[in-house]
Image (spheres, rainbow, N blue to C red):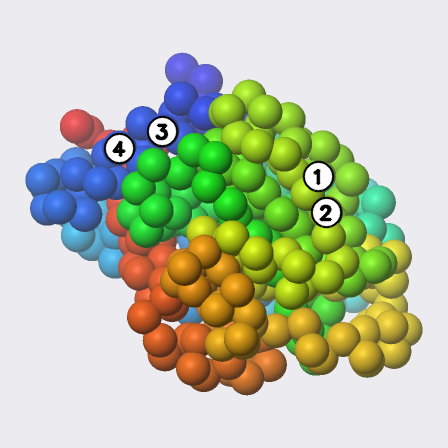
Amino acid sequence: MTKRDFITAEEYGADAVDRILDLAVKVKQGKVLGGLERKVMANVFLDPSLRTRTSFETAMFLHGGHAVVLEPGRSSWTWETESGAVMDKDTVEHIREAAAVLGRYADVVGIRSFPRGSDWNVAREDHIVRDFARFCEKPVVNLESARRHPCQQLADTLTLREKLGDTKGKRFVLLWSWHPKPLPTAVPASAALAAAHNGMEIVIARPEGYELDPEDTALIRKITQERGGGFVHIMDDPDEAMASADAVYVKSWGSLKYFGHPEEEKAHRAGLRDWRMTEQRLRSTRGGKAAVMHCLPVRRNVEIDDAVLDGPSSAVIDEAENRLHVQRALLLDMIGKL
């Protein structure tokens, strides 16, 4: 049987995503027990994690399975990820053998790899995650790559439905926020795709020079139309963007123009510290009560003010909890015995 990887939610399929979300609701309600007995998940983290690591380990345990975590360069050998590399320096094990071996040991394998290098045209191909999936004979889960965070996307899709009920036509604002470091575009692109899947009207508010990858923006527009949503608006005024928002997703990301050149990018963003979620901006949303979302970790009083994070509109903890439930459903869908 051909294996099925979860590299992006769109490649997995809209019907499959809805099936997983329906199952996640049942899982969260305690209506689904077991299903992963004697199953093993191996998770490879080339970059740090709190929620992803903990939620997948917990998910496997709750359904009778087991999770193994590897951190190349720390708890396991340092990996080489380039094809054709002459491995006479610091790397010890090639991703080709590592992926193949883990595919023999585990029933499903996850891998996290943030963007690397100085050329976005190379990084955007997600070759580390996709090469790993190619070399591994078992299903592979993208635990966040340069382009996508599909597990977060599932959680965001579910959270929007829980907070807003019928999401069709409701207004979702993706709000760029200042951050001392340039961050990947994986989460903001995935968050907008979650709103698109839910058929929402989407506003992407960002300063000039902080556009998402054009291919991602085109995909967001396409799915929004397919799922019965409204227009996708691009704005450069954060206050204007807040008007009538039903949900505000706050997230920073780096300028792709300066990808791989953080010092140049730092100078470009120096005057943008006012781009954050404040109480005043929250009051401009629909009824002053829009759901405020963030994938976490969040820099308090830099991305979102304390008063908003600690107030009744904050959905960040519920959103993080939903990572567990959607991933339980995902694993049951991929390798479960239901």
The residue under label 4 is 22
Residue 274 visible at all:
yes
Q: How far across and down, in percent of the image, does residue 229 sit?
A: 53, 30
Closer to us: mark 4 or mark 1? Answer: 1
Residue 126 horizontal side relative to residue 160, left or right: right
The amino acid beneath tag 1 is Thr
Q: How far across and down, in percent of the image, does residue 255 sit?
A: 80, 60
| Sooner in the amino-acid sequence: mark 3 or mark 1 | 3
Seen in the picture, residue 77 relative to 181 is either above or below; the reply is above
The amino acid beneath tag 4 is Asp
- C-alpha gap between disc 4 and disc 3: 6 Å
- C-alpha gap between disc 1 and disc 2: 10 Å
| Sooner in the amino-acid sequence: mark 1 or mark 2 | 1
| Sooner in the amino-acid sequence: mark 4 or mark 1 | 4
Q: Are marks 3 and 2 in contact (CB under 8 Å)?
A: no
The residue under label 1 is 217
Which mark, by number, is residue 234? 2
| Sooner in the amino-acid sequence: mark 3 or mark 2 | 3
Q: Are marks 4 and 3 in contact (CB under 8 Å)?
A: yes
Residue 315 horizontal side relative to residue 173, left or right: left
Q: Which residue is drawn at 78% across and 51% down?
A: 211
The amino acid beneath tag 3 is Asp
Q: Which residue is drawn at 39% across and 47% down?
A: 160
- C-alpha gap between disc 3 and disc 2: 27 Å
**Which quadrant is home to the C terminus?**
top left
Closer to us: mark 1 or mark 2? Answer: 2
Residue at disc 2, secondary structure: strand
Residue at disc 1, secondary structure: helix
Q: Do the residues labelled 1 and 2 touch (CB within 8 Å)?
A: yes
The residue under label 3 is 18
Closer to us: mark 3 or mark 2? Answer: 2
